Amino acid sequence: MTVTAETIAIDTDVASGLIRRTLPAAVADGLADATLAVTFVTVGELFRGAVHARWGPRRTADLTMWLARLLVLPADRTVARRWGQITGAALRAGRPLPTNDSWIAACCLTHGIPLATLNTRDFANVRGLRLVTASAGDE
């Protein structure tokens, strides 16, 4: 895996928007020159959605091929330790984080890359996490 200065991790909502071609143009344009990455969590969430929606083999294969063009940030001991730090601090502050979002944040922090998301609310209090997109839906 090669993470570059132009690498941006995309949250599941951004990945879904790219796949469906429904991502707001301003967000898509901001990602145009970046190397895109997803976390292991986003891979799982996308396939969960495909199974839930009863996608057939062709659409599932298309998803697999689309994901093959992206970097995948895996879970490892360093990510797990960062996840423990993030979630422990959030609990101590009285602001627990959704489990999947905290894993995504841990991956981004561990690899030193920003996260493109339309869901800034769940990530706003993660210290040190750089967010590169926002949505009117976060009001």
Image (tube, rainbow, N blue to C red):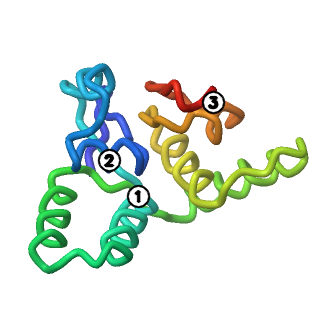
Horizontal side of residue 44 vs 100, given as left or right: left
- 55 or 32: which is nearer to us? 55
State the SS at label 1: helix
Image coords of residue 100 (percent x, y): 57, 59
Element carrying mark 3: loop
- Label 1, label 3: how far apart the Cα atoms are: 20 Å
Residue at left offset 57%, top offset 33%: 120
Q: Amino acid type of disc 3? A: Gly
| Residue 42: numbered disc | 1
| Structural crowding at the residue carrying mark 2, measured as other residues with C-alpha within 10 Å and reported as few (<14), some (14–19) or many (≥20) | many
- Residue 15 numbered mark, or none: 2
Secondary structure of the residue carrying tag 2 is helix
- Dot 1 or dot 2, earlier in sequence: 2
Confirm or deny contact between disc 1 and disc 2 (CB under 8 A). Answer: yes
For disc 3, the marked residue is 128
- Amino acid type at circle 2 is Ala
Above or below, 101 against 45 in this view is above
